[in-house]
Amino acid sequence: MAGAKRFRTLTGRGRALLACGVVLVLAGVLLGFPDLTRIGVLLMALPLVARLIARRRPPQLSVERHVVPTRLQPDERADVAVDFVNLGSRSTTLYTAEEQVDFVLGDRPRFLLPRLEPGARRRLTYAIRSQVRGRHRLGPIALQQQDPFGLTHVDLMVRSESEVVVLPRVVPLGAGQPAGSGMGIEGETPQMVALHGEDDVSIRAYRDGDDLRKVHWPATAHRGELMVRQEDRPARRSAVLLLDSRESGHSPGSYSGTFEWAVSAVASVATHLGRFGYTLHLATRETLAAGELDTDLDPASVLEQLAVAERGSDEEHERLVQAAQDLTERTGGLVAVVTSVDDLSMPTLAALRRPGTGAQAMVIDPDAFQQGAAEVGEVTLGHQALLHRAGWRAVPVGGQTSIPEAWQLLTASGRPGVLT
């Protein structure tokens, strides 16, 4: 059995019998009772003989595991089938099998593995589910065998492992397509009118930061608001999704409510934009470390990346924002889920929005979130105002703000700073 570790030991009954034998031998010798000594020797011999019998060669077992599906939504059930095949030339004995699984997948499955003839196959099945996102391990399998008297047991650890991925929780954000003026994403067409006689130029509403030399005065006079010229962009639409994973900005503990909210928000936005053909770029500490910031992703790939997202340091977040500057120059829109932990990083984040493009932010107040308060603090409101001045559309997130509510506020108006 390749990759197996074997352990032999006495059970509690075997150790007790051995101890009684030692006591009886000593008592028989000291008191001069040969019969008592013989009984003690017999009691000592029984567990030792049982342990010697347990030294037989371990079975040659092959273990294969089949998991359906391997990618799970939170609280979705997966069926696991474990196939045991006897590759040896001798029959196996009865074993008690226990699958070693991560605790978030539920109780460890235990079952009896019956006697297998050479070449025989046996399939055992169980089910798993989890509400905790991440990559979770299945295996190895622990096999245990006891002698008929329960004096010894042999433990075999079969090194056969698989994994399942529990994806972040995704909530629906509505059936409507993202507003073009809100996202400002590459290839957007809403609220853009083709200029007469110009195939490659369109006009759109003025946004903070646009070059005033591009103001289209006839269209401005006609519509009663500033309109600017804009060359038609490629049909491909893309967006950058940025996740603030600073440990200092999220609630503490092994399970962080604010961080899980942020991960779920990014996952939900990715799924929503993917329905309308957006190409996605994910900016997290993991994609930065892997050099995958500029990789084009579909929603399924984004969810798989977010499944393993973890909190990191402030320095990692600073490097992430700096690296995202080059990325936002080549893409059309930005959606960020950030925390209002300090005043130093927010101006750098605000500078990620390029003139003529859209940027949206959900700004989490960690204190209000942890206390379950609906109202956010002055620091969070100040960060929201800073982003508004930079042309962003931002909404504060308190302890009672849902992801659909935050998204609805961000997409409710075509102008930065108008959140109803």
Image (tube, rainbow, N blue to C red):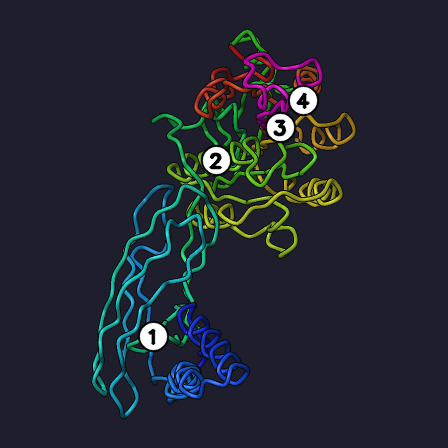
Q: Nearer the viewer, mark 1 or mark 2?
A: 1
Q: Which residue is mark 1?
A: 146
Q: Secondary structure at mark 1?
A: strand
Q: Which residue is mark 3?
A: 356
| Mark before the other along the chain sequence, 1 or 4 | 1
Residue kind at label 3, given as amino acid type: Gly
Q: Which residue is mark 2?
A: 264
Placement of 145 over or under 80, stated as above or below: below
Q: Position of residue 364 (x, y in %)?
A: 60, 25
Residue 275 magenta: no
Q: Which residue is mark 4?
A: 387
| Mark before the other along the chain sequence, 1 or 2 | 1
CA gap between label 2 and label 3 equals: 28 Å
Q: Position of residue 312 (x, y in %)?
A: 67, 44
* Cβ–Cβ under 8 Å for marks 2 and 3: no
| Mark before the other along the chain sequence, 2 or 3 | 2
Report the span colored magenta: 359-380
Q: Nearer the viewer, mark 1 or mark 4?
A: 1
